[in-house]
Amino acid sequence: MNEFPKRRMRRLRRTPALRKLVRETELAPAHLIQPLFVVEDDRAAGPIAAMPGVARLTLDGLPARIEQIRAAGVPAVLLFGIPATKSPAADAARRADGIVPRAVRACRDAADDLAIITDVCVCSYTDHGHCGVVTDGAVDNDASLGILAEMAVSHARAGADLVAPSAMMDGQVAALRGALDAAGFAETGILSYAVKYASSFYGPFREAADSTPGFGDRRAYQMDPANAREALAEAELDVAEGADALMVKPALPYLDVVAAVRQRFPQVPLAAYQVSGEYAMIAAAAANGWLDERLAALEALTAIRRAGADWIITYYADRVAGWRAA
Ligand code: PBG
């Protein structure tokens, strides 16, 4: 048998060059997607307390930020809009001149070679903060589909490459695909938030996007963190409905789910979202001197890739290039 002392695992760990040769997982800016928050009301722009280093941008501030992201070699952005007005039926989400369509055009003007992905959900646009319209005190699945579809078409019309439905309404991928095709946007793709858990790790995002539910929580539509097999059912349905790529969210606490979806759907590109709370945990510990932010972030992102994610959506995206060189 080829056992100790004949076989010594440490031989291939001895130098940086040997470690490079045996490294199984690659983390590069090309795998990353940068989320951006864009406000309609300029007065709402500025730093996000719970996400040190992340800010809400004005439309005017977008080009300079886009330039940083391009320079870092990150190929894609994921846009979230924060409208000036909220209403029960999320009217601001459906306008052709809404904040996201305008932000898409601003991104296009700033950098034509960047992939533009838009989040399709109404939680920042409804006065009650839920991800769909509310009927009799409950989020109404089927009544929400048309609104989400209209929103997606407005993003496609503005030039989005991919729309990313995150509302966790059943049938949303099919609704979007149908509406996009009918409106002449057969080439616009769908990155489905297929596996989205009802997670406490979205806390800082809700401050950023001003989308905290005014009553109740999202557990009647987002997934129970205890479930993994159900994730495969969600993914299967979304592939059948026409999703071009799948997402698991959050990322690090759900690496088993990332690996399972990767294994079950080897032909479908898979994204994982390192969400606001995952970011905030590292940033807060680093601010206290308890963690090395660069090393902790690179380790978490590498682990997410190792579990099987092709793409990672991360607030650290544009910082990774500099960090890898360091
Ligand atoms: C919209 C949406 C959320 C996130 C992405 N899209 C919040 C939520 O579902 O409550 C969270 C992203 C993050 O925490 O970074 N529904």
Image (tube, rainbow, N blue to C red):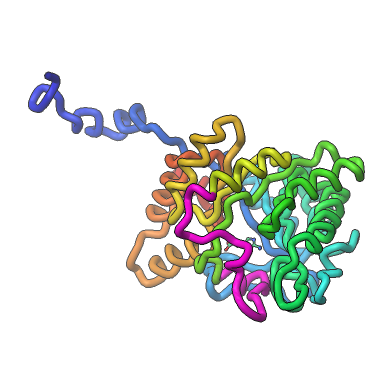
Q: Is residue 229 magenta?
A: yes
Question: Residue 92: x, y in percent?
Answer: 84, 68
Tell me which residue sits at (43%, 47%) in the image: 256
Which is nearer the eye, 121 or 78? 121
Identify the residue at image location x=51%, y=61%: 224
Q: Is residue 158 found inside the magenta-colored segment of the image?
A: no
Farthest left residue in view? 5
Q: Quadrant of the N terminus?
A: top left
Q: Quadrant of ligand 1?
A: bottom right
Q: Is residue 251 above or below residue 207?
A: above
Q: Residue at x 44, y 42 (%)?
A: 307
Left or right, 69 with respect to 20, comes to right
* Residue at image location 74% in from the left, 52% down from the top: 172
**Most foreground residue, 316 or 172:** 172
Where residue 67 sits: x, y (%)?
69, 51
Q: Provide the major secondary structure of the magenta segment.
A: loop
Which image quadrant is residue 209 in? Answer: bottom right
Q: Quadrant of residue 121?
A: bottom right
What segment is highlighted magenta in the picture?
204-230
**Residue 326 visible in the picture:** no
Q: Position of residue 69 (x, y in %)?
A: 64, 50
Q: Residue 143 appears at what percent x and percent y?
A: 81, 63
In the image, taking residue 150 as reference, residue 283 lies left or right, namely: left
Task: Pick out the residue farthest to the bottom.
Answer: 215
Let me know if residue 209 appears in the view.
Answer: yes
